[in-house]
Structure formats: C-alpha cells, structure tokens
Amino acid sequence: MTITEYIVLFFMILGALFIFVASIGLLKMPDVYLRMSAATIAATFGVASVLVAAAIHFGTITVTLHILGIIIFLILTVPVGAHMLGRAAVIIGLKQWNRTVSNDIEGTYDEETHQFCCMDEIRKSSGNASDHEED
C-alpha cells in the first residue's frame, strides 16, 4: 500500500468513528436537544472526513472542488437546520432533560405572537436593565 492509501484509510476510519459516535449519541442522549447536538457535530465531522478521503483518493481538481463545496455547504447548513429544529422543539413544548443546568431560551417564546423576544427585553421586564444602561 502507498502512503496515499494509508491517508485515505485514516480519514475513512476517522469518519466512520465520528458517525458511529453520532449514532450512539442519538440512541443514548435523554432529550431532543442533546440528540441534535450529537447528530449535528459528530455526523458533520464524520461526513467531512469521508469526503476528504474521497478527495484524496480521486485526486482530480474537479472532484476536490466539488467535495470542498459539499463540505462548505454542510458546515453552513447543518447548524442552521439544527437551530431550526431546536426552535421548533421549544415552540411545541418539548421539555429539556431534568438535569439540564442552564436554559437560556426559557421565557423567551411568546405563545400569543409566536415570536421569540430578545434577552434585552427580558432584562428590562425583570428590572435588571438598569445595570447595563448609562445615564
């Protein structure tokens, strides 16, 4: 085997391990929010590693550019998709795991207007805004 084949093998195994960890995370995590985190982070790196292996294996500029485009597309779209799934989970009222330490989005969704308000509005309504305002 050549050194190129070893590099391709390394990236394929690395990608398979990331995807395997993502699948375990989907099975073992206790709520939808943690499952999304496992799936998006590990699976993105796993797929990107497999694509890097394919780019090295084929070695042509056209294949490499296509794969680079796919990786950039994944890095840009997967977090946005996970964010939208998380917002949908909050809107329909899926509860977080009972051992979750912090919930920054709690109290930001208005069921009447179906909009999320920003943290500045929450601080103002709770009276903590005076600490941040200057006279």
Image (tube, helix red, strand yellow):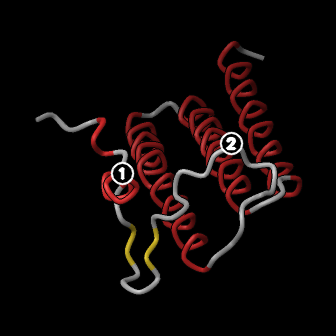
> Above or below — where is 12 with respect to 124?
above
Quarter placement of the N terminus? top right
The image position of residue 96, as x and y in percent, is: 72, 61
In this orientation, which residue lies closer to the viewer: 8 or 1? Answer: 8
In this picture, residue 88 sits left or right of residue 114: right
In this picture, residue 102 sits left or right of residue 65: right
Q: Which residue is mark 2?
A: 42
The image position of residue 82, as x and y in percent, is: 55, 59
Measure the C-alpha gap from mark 2 to mark 1: 40 Å
In this orientation, which residue lies closer to the viewer: 63 or 114? Answer: 114
In this orientation, which residue lies closer to the viewer: 16 or 56? Answer: 16
Quarter placement of the C terminus? top left
Which kind of residue does numbered mark 1 sit on? Gly
Disc on the earlier residue, 2 or 1: 2
Q: Which residue is mark 1?
A: 127
Which kind of residue does numbered mark 2 sit on? Ala
The residue under the point 68% across, 27% down is 8
Which circle, 2 or 1, is nearer the viewer? 1
The image position of residue 11, as x and y in percent, is: 69, 29
Secondary structure under badge 1?
loop
Q: Quadrant of residue 90?
A: bottom right
The residue under the point 74% across, 38% down is 18
